Amino acid sequence: MDDDLPRPKGDAASALAKESLDPYSQDELAERIMLLEAEIARIKAHRDKAAAHRTAADALFGPKS
């Protein structure tokens, strides 16, 4: 994938939000919740790492105006 290209409109979370949950069993829904919670944790960890990187860069080079 080329990082220079604009991101496509919409994202996976938007697509999931539109999906009907009616066909899923309670076990399937519980598994889906566990997977989504794991993905949320992964995203938060990445966000925190990026924020720490930005803070370190700002401390070294000063805040970007």
Image (cartoon, rainbow, N blue to C red):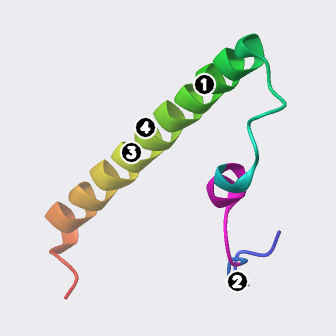
Question: What span is in magenta?
Answer: 9-16
Q: Is residue 17 above or below residue 21?
A: below
Residue at figure coordinates x 20%, y 67% from the top left: 58
Crowdedness near tag 1: few (<14), some (14–19) or many (≥20) residues, C-alpha within 10 Å:
few
**19 or 35, which lies in front?**
19
* Residue of label 1: 33
Residue placed under numbered mark 2 in the picture: 4
Q: For numbered disc 4, what is the local secondary structure? A: helix
Q: Secondary structure at mark 2?
A: loop
Please give the label number shown on residue 49: 3
Mark 4–mark 2 Cα distance, whole angstroms, equals 24 Å
Quadrant in which the C terminus appears: bottom left
Q: Main secondary structure of the magenta part?
A: helix
| Mark nearer the N terminus (4 vs 2) | 2
Q: What residue type is disc 2 on? A: Asp
Q: Which mark is residue 45?
A: 4
- Quarter of the figure with the N terminus: bottom right
Of circles 1 and 3, the one toward us is 1
